[in-house]
Image: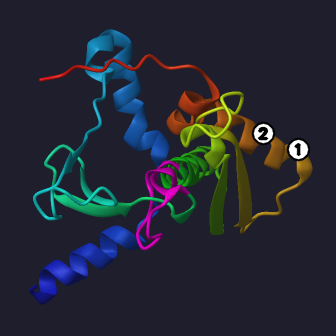
Amino acid sequence: MNTQLAVENTETRDKAISMRDRQGPLINRYKQNPEAAQIIDYAKTTSNAIKANDPLHAQVLIDRSHKVPVTIGVHHLLGGDGDKATPGDLLCGALASCFDSTTRIIANHMGLTLESLSVEVKGFVDARGTLLVDPAVCVGFRRFDVHIAIKAKQRLNEEVTSKLIKAVEHSCVVYQTLNHSVEINTVIT
């Protein structure tokens, strides 16, 4: 990397980012053309990098170019080795990362300068459901706990914090998806 480019990247990073400036034109565009606001996210599994007959591991290629590989495994309470992130971990990670980025964006809109932010998500599953031990036990997550540690340059009183978190819960795509039913279509090709 040349020095000029490094200096420009540092200057760009150090400039205050205004989400209003970035999102304002998008909001106007989407008001005039709702179709332009449609997002399609991608993930695809492959066994090319893993033994195809290994039931305990797979690789998920994340993003539309399928260039971000994540090796996943089966949870040890479901008979796996517990040696890799599980699909449930990825779901918790999706909620944590979406909640984090949404918090930072909305805090920026509110004029808050964040000094630190940490979002931890715990998802609770009863393995008896997926292993068919008890047909009365739900298959899937029963609950997600989202723990947020936030520190801003400004003092965050209860009213501001409540307003921020309500706005985040409203705008966080993964939070809203998990909080409500979503249509899933399965197609065999």
The residue at 35%/29% (across/down) is 26
Residue 139 numbered mark, or none: none
In percent of width and height, residue 78 lies at: 52, 55
134 or 9: nearer the eye? 134
Q: Which residue corresponds to mark 2? A: 163
Magenta span of residues: 78-91
Q: Image quadrant for the N terminus?
A: bottom left
Q: Residues within 10 Å of mark 1 (few under 14, many from 20)?
A: few
Residue 82 is inside the magenta segment: yes
Type of amino acid at the residue the image marks with label 1? Glu
The residue at 55%/43% (across/down) is 131
Q: Which residue corresponds to mark 1? A: 159
86 lies above or below 39: below
Residue 53 in the figure: left or right of residue 77:
left
The residue at 44%/16% (across/down) is 183
* Residue 138 position by quadrant: top right
122 or 159: nearer the eye? 122
The residue at 41%/25% (across/down) is 27
